[in-house]
Image (spheres, helix red, strand yellow):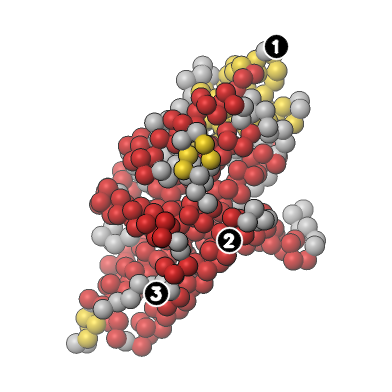
Amino acid sequence: MTAHPLSLIDADAMLTQEQRDLSASTRALLDTKVRPHLMEWYEAGEAPVRELARMFGTLGLLGMHLNGYGCAGADATTYGLACLELEAADSGIRSLVSVQGSLAMYAIHAFGSDAQKQQWLPGMAAGELIGCFGLSEADAGSDPGSMRTFAKRDGADWILNGSKMWITNGHYADVAIIWAGTDEGIRGFAVPTDTPGFVATAVKHKMSLRASATSELTFTDMRVPDSTLLPGANSLRGPLSCLSEARFGIVFGVVGAARDCLETALSYAANRSQFDQPIAGFQLTQRKIAEMTSTVATSFLLAMRLGQIKDAHAIKPEQISLGKFTNVSSAIAVAREARTILGANGISGEYPIMRHMANLESVLTYEGTHEVHTLVIGQAVTGIAAFR
């Protein structure tokens, strides 16, 4: 009889009844509607984004940490716990929810006009409208300030030219949050994707996050009215604040991926017999299980502490960097160790571990690379910036 990996720290006692109920309902939905299809979607290279969005919208997961406009208004920790359950299924599934809520919806909610909020947010919260977030470019990843996409005023309109790369949900999106250089600095636009000059092309041949829809966006003399401009964002701080929201979800999410790997290894070790006993009874296997249990528990505690700080409206970007830096690398280590317990079966699609391993390699470098978060933490504790 195996115990829940987080039972040694009595994790459920740290949660409110509402949080326990949300975690349970999210996991139940994923167990019935998502997990049975994940390997099929992974091999196909894409999941049914619109169907999933409507399903998650019904459960109240899209933009759930935002207030008004059909959003649930949950606290940050509750949102993080939802991300944990989503990523326990698949990082690409959590990415769908993160990009919709913490990037696209948050940008409109934080920086948009009242008209933009009314136009987009209710439909996005329900999953009837899909959003994407266009910041990264082929030559501007860790240094978004060097972006080449440019918007030039032309009377009452703007004309955008450029491209964005690695954009989740891009070829499904109804609205794209596009960040561009202007003569006034970096500005954001909420652009309907049926605008002439907007093209979204699916990125193929990915070896990671295969259940996530990824696109390249291109804009050729794309004319948009001034009403698409996000009036509250007038510098790089705008998109960076959106990224902090998404990174917070990752801090929790990857704990879910690690927990799922550990649960899989525990179940396998209890049922796999060699030398006339379950391999869970061997000392070396128990050492692996003990170390993984410690790692998952520690990552959960870090995520919960950061949730407390964020709910007190006191969180700093470097604290979120610490959470992503620590928990993503820890999740990768757990996935690799869990795979060894399954032996050759660990690479089979019958089990989720290799899929989690591949996905986590992307999570390590998106929403800020591991190296960038290293330097953010280093600057916070030394007072010296080492980015250049």
**Mark 2 Cα-neighbour bin, 10 Å: few <14, some 14–19, many ≥20:** some
Per the image, the residue denoted by label 2 is 308
Which residue is found at the position 35% from the left and 72% from the top?
Answer: 4
Task: Measure the C-alpha gap from mark 2 to mark 1.
Answer: 47 Å
Using residue 43 as the reference point, say whether residue 72 is left or right of it.
right
Disc sitting over residue 253 in the figure: none
Per the image, the residue denoted by label 1 is 155
Using residue 130 as the reference point, say whether residue 312 is left or right of it.
right
Task: Measure the C-alpha gap from mark 3 to mark 2.
Answer: 21 Å
Which residue is found at the position 22% from the left and 76% from the top?
Answer: 271
Question: Could you tell me which secondary element the residue under label 1 belongs to?
Answer: loop
Residue with the most extreme top position: 155
Vertical placement of 295 versus 192: above or below?
below
**Mark 1 Cα-neighbour bin, 10 Å: few <14, some 14–19, many ≥20:** few
CB contact under 8 Å: marks 1 and 3:
no
Report x, y in % for residue 219. 56, 24
Per the image, the residue denoted by label 3 is 7
Say whether disc 1 or disc 3 marks the residue closer to the N-terminus.
3
Report x, y in % for residue 111. 63, 34
Say whether disc 2 or disc 1 marks the residue closer to the N-terminus.
1
